[in-house]
């Protein structure tokens, strides 16, 4: 729904891309008991939203559902890094490393340059880092640059690694303990402004190509071509008929299809205030004692926060919707990061924490005594088709979501005999995407451009018409009331949790979340009033034919 009377006005979203409560109600009614669609996608994380986009862009009719919200599961708990595959190169997984580097370049240079940009990292050479470790790390960074070259990613997009003097290292990493510092290693990788915003952009781009994006719709069971679903908002049940089904439900994939064995791995991050570190022009790689190619990462964010992560611990038993962070993970991360910083980081400095579950495919034969560390399990994705024709895509990681989606659609098309063209998503810009020079010329604040891309002026225009909408939701945080309103009108946010925990990341700090609840409720009320005034089917929601 556009806040203006004309979809071509300054506050109009990309044509056909608006997701709203009204559109959800209408398209859910059309999907349940309606005509058979080509593809039903279960799960709206990065992979599921990517599947919906890939299929819709090929001309297939698509319904994509999630029992919760966009990016509700693993896709909002990542390190926010778009990796080039260096770690996989070190473990001999050359194909995974190359695929990661290619997909990183696709995101940075073609499909999402507004959301993914280069991030510098410093590995400080403290007394705890031996010369042998430093030489190994340097060789790895040089190999990573070779991956960049093989993936044909421009040097202007990702600069070359280089050695740093002690003075240079202190300039880029002033919080590192100076005693015994003998320099550092500078490397570059991709960083996404917000993983949940990437998923939102994927879902909206799929919607612009005709896909029905339905959150709060739970699949109760599927018989291959018929899925029993329940509207989690009303409790009403019905059926969606599809010629093919793709199971992209991540760590919960085994609940929909029998025989899928997932070995979840928990990745934990701490959230700290940026002023604890002082100026932080670059992120930090801090080696984990006893490990040759694993690091704790210190990741500065655009919102005055710093993430410290991450762990890689196996998870057994029932899987929660929102994983808890154990104190053992907190202590481990604080110990490692404290080994390199000048000022101590205490438990009281941790203002928030989050954990995600990686959906690793367990390929170890189910024999007693055979287990592998989750950190050693391959991140290569797998596409499997069950006897009843359901295609499941599991494994992989955020960076390679697009290739995972392409492979899943290819498999579903082949298994069910669908007529579809080749994948086009490697060159298909997401909502808000534009070349860096165009993004730099937009008449909007930088923090809006990094989150909304070419739609930033439209979000900014809301505040221009109502100065109160330009106020920050939380003092010192860049998210404004206008961004919350935009998320309800155009990004499918249905309640306070959608707004604070996924469309924005205010909720990562419980104190900030509590302070922002009233503003979130106000945005929902304002959007509801707008719908009453302008009707439930504004022109900006109509998908162009």
Image (spheres, rainbow, N blue to C red):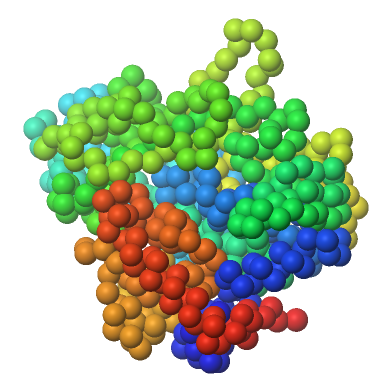
Q: Residue furthest top?
A: 369
The total of numbered circles placed on residues is 0
Q: Position of residue 152 (x, y in %)?
A: 54, 56
Q: Residue at x 66, y 53 (%)?
A: 235
- Return the residue nearer the eye: 499 or 264: 499
Q: Is residue 33 left or right of residue 5?
A: right
Image height of 215 relative to 335, above or below: below
Image height of 248 relative to 521, above or below: above
Q: Residue furthest front?
A: 235
Image height of 154 relative to 3, above or below: above
Q: Work out which quarter of the rendered image holds the C terminus and state it.
A: bottom right
Quadrant for residue 362, please give it.
Answer: top right
Q: Residue furthest left?
A: 179
Quadrant for residue 157, please give it.
Answer: bottom left
- Return the residue nearer the eye: 390 or 144: 390
Q: Residue at x 19, y 40 (%)?
A: 349
- Return the residue nearer the eye: 314 or 101: 314
Q: Is residue 336 visible?
A: no
- Return the residue nearer the eye: 22 or 310: 22
Q: Position of residue 130 (x, y in %)?
A: 25, 24
Q: Position of residue 371 (x, y in %)?
A: 57, 15
Q: Residue furthest right?
A: 417
Q: Position of residue 227 (x, y in %)?
A: 79, 49
Q: Is residue 129 visible?
A: yes
Q: Residue at x 30, y 31 (%)?
A: 330
Image height of 56 relative to 280, above or below: below
Q: Work out which quarter of the rendered image holds the N terminus and state it.
A: bottom right
Q: Is residue 404 left or right of residue 148?
A: right
Q: Residue at x 78, y 55 (%)?
A: 238
């Amino acid at each position: 729904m556009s806040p203006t009377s004309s979809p071509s006005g300054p506050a109009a979203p990309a044509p056909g891309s608006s997701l709203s409560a009204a559109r959800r109600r209408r398209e859910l009614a059309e999907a349940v008991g309606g005509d058979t669609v080509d593809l039903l996608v279960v799960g709206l994380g990065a992979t599921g939203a990517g599947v919906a986009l890939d299929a819709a862009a090929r001309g297939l009719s698509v319904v994509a559902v999630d029992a919760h919200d966009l990016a509700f599961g693993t896709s909002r708990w990542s390190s926010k890094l778009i990796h080039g595959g260096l770690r996989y190169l070190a473990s001999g997984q050359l194909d995974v490393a190359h695929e990661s580097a290619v997909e990183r370049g696709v995101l940075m240079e073609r499909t999402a340059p507004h959301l993914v940009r280069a991030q510098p990292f410093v590995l400080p050479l403290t007394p705890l880092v031996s010369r042998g470790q430093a030489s190994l790390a340097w060789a790895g960074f040089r190999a990573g640059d070779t991956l960049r070259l093989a993936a044909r990613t421009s040097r202007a997009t990702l600069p070359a690694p280089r050695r740093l003097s002690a003075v240079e290292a202190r300039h880029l990493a002033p919080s590192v303990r100076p005693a015994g510092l003998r320099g550092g290693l500078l490397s570059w990788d991709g960083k996404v402004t917000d993983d949940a915003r990437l998923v939102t952009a994927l879902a909206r781009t799929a919607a612009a190509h005709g896909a029905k994006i339905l959150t709060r719709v739970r699949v109760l069971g599927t018989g291959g071509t018929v899925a029993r679903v329940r509207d989690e908002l009303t409790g009403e049940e019905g059926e969606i008929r599809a010629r093919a089904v793709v199971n992209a439900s991540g760590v919960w994939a085994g609940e929909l299809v029998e025989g899928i064995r997932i070995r979840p791995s928990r990745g934990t991050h701490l959230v700290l205030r940026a002023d604890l570190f002082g100026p932080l022009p670059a992120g930090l790689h801090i080696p984990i004692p006893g490990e040759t190619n694993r690091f704790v990462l210190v990741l500065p964010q655009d919102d005055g926060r710093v993430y410290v992560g991450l762990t890689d611990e196996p998870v057994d038993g029932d899987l929660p919707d929102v994983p808890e962070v154990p104190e053992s993970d907190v202590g481990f991360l604080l110990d490692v990061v404290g080994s390199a910083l000048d000022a101590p980081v205490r438990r009281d400095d941790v203002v928030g924490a989050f954990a995600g579950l990686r959906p690793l495919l367990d390929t170890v034969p189910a024999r007693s005594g055979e287990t592998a560390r989750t950190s050693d399990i391959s991140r290569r994705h797998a596409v499997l088709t069950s006897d009843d024709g359901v295609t499941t895509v599991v494994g992989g990681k955020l960076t390679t979501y697009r290739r995972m989606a392409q492979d899943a659609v290819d498999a579903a098309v082949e298994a069910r005999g669908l007529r579809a063209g080749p994948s086009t998503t490697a060159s298909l810009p997401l909502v808000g995407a534009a070349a860096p020079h165009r993004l730099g010329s937009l008449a909007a604040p930088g923090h809006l451009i990094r989150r909304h891309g070419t739609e930033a002026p439209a979000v900014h225009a809301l505040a221009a018409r109502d100065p109160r909408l330009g106020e920050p939701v939380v003092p010192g945080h860049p998210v404004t009331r206008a961004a919350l309103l935009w998320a309800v009108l155009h990004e499918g946010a249905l309640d306070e949790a959608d707004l604070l925990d996924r469309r924005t990341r205010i909720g990562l700090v419980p104190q900030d979340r509590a302070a922002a609840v009233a503003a979130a409720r106000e945005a929902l009320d304002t959007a509801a009033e707008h719908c009453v005034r302008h009707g439930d089917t504004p022109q900006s929601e109509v998908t162009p034919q």
